[in-house]
């Protein structure tokens, strides 16, 4: 069955070009010229992905992404002409899965879309190569923190953690390698299918979000540690000592 993408773009010519390209690879693309009906369409029939422009008539893409994250766990990819560090940081802060500039070659866009869909974002289901694959452990227990990859849920101190798809995947990847240092390059390749270019801050921003939700001191983190010049380490034993 074709994977369905809702594409919100007010430039009809660009929407037709990108939509046609994706349809040639057997995606089902539903185009919306603005975000007026986006939330209701996603609620009624959740797609595997939302591809979202930032500059839109009415509600802008950042506002729509924030509202989507109240109920939708699938990948939300911002596709925009705004090559802005601030907009990129804001996008990741509110739960966007990726930020792609419109000048990106179509083949690269396709590769990134496929990488996100392989992570099992779609409807919050299992991953193709990820945590809940047959033979893998599907749940982890670290004292106050429990993570269930099969149901894609996590609780901390008996309270549910409200995580975007990308943040859940990051937490699971860190936790299943507890005690190991994971580089930014490893995390980007595993979670997004791209290499670290030395500038991408999306992993750092997501780590900051996780620390906040896990009550980890951002100045002296003990649960998700920063290892200078190497990456991040998920501590295995601290959770039982709180």
Image (cartoon, rainbow, N blue to C red):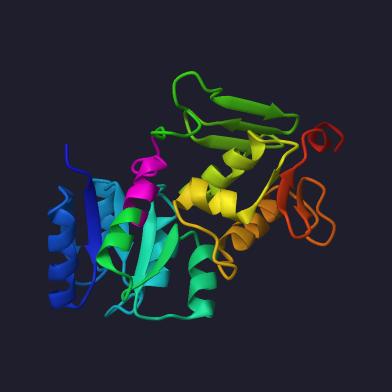
Q: Tell me the magenta residue range.
A: 112-125
| In the displayed structure image, the side of residue 242 where residue 129 appears, left or right | left
Q: Is residue 168 above or below residue 76?
A: above
| In the displayed structure image, the side of residue 25 where residue 150 appears, left or right | right
Q: Position of residue 9 (x, y in %)?
A: 23, 71
Residue at position x 29%, y 69% in the image: 105
Viewer-proximal residue among 214 and 43: 214
118 magenta-colored: yes
Q: Is residue 128 above or below residue 190?
A: above
Q: Position of residue 220 (x, y in %)?
A: 85, 57
Quarter occupied by residue 181:
top right
Q: Is residue 16 above or below residue 153?
A: below
178 magenta-colored: no
Quadrant of the image containing the N terminus: top left
Residue at position x 18%, y 74% in the image: 14
Quarter occupied by residue 37:
bottom left
Q: Position of residue 176 (x, y in %)?
A: 63, 33
Q: Is residue 205 visible?
A: yes
Viewer-proximal residue among 74 and 204: 204
Residue at position x 31%, y 74% in the image: 102
Quadrant of the image containing the C terminus: top right
Q: Position of residue 30 (x, y in %)?
A: 16, 57
Residue placed furthest toward the top: 135
């Amino acid at each position: 069955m074709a994977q369905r993408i809702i594409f919100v773009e007010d430039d009809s010519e660009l929407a037709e070009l990108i939509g046609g390209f994706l349809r040639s690879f057997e995606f089902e693309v539903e185009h919306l010229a603005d975000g007026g009906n986006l939330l209701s369409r996603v609620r009624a029939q959740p797609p595997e992905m939302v591809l979202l422009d930032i500059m839109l008539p009415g509600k802008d893409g950042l506002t729509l992404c924030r509202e989507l994250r109240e109920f939708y766990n699938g990948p939300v990819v911002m596709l925009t002409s705004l090559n802005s560090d601030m907009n990129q940081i804001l996008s990741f802060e509110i739960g966007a899965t990726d930020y792609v500039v419109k000048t990106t070659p179509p083949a690269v866009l396709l590769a990134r879309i496929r990488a996100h869909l392989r992570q099992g974002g779609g409807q919050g289901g299992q991953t193709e190569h990820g945590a809940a694959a047959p033979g893998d452990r599907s749940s982890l227990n670290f004292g106050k923190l429990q993570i269930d990859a099969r149901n894609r849920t996590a609780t901390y101190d008996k309270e549910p953690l409200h995580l975007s798809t990308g943040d859940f995947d990051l937490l699971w990847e860190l936790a299943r390698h507890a005690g190991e240092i994971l580089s930014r390059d490893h995390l980007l390749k595993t979670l997004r299918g791209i290499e670290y270019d030395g500038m991408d801050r999306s992993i750092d921003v997501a780590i900051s979000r996780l620390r906040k939700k896990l009550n980890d001191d951002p100045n002296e983190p003990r649960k998700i540690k920063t290892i200078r010049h190497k990456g991040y380490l998920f501590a295995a034993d601290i959770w039982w000592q709180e």
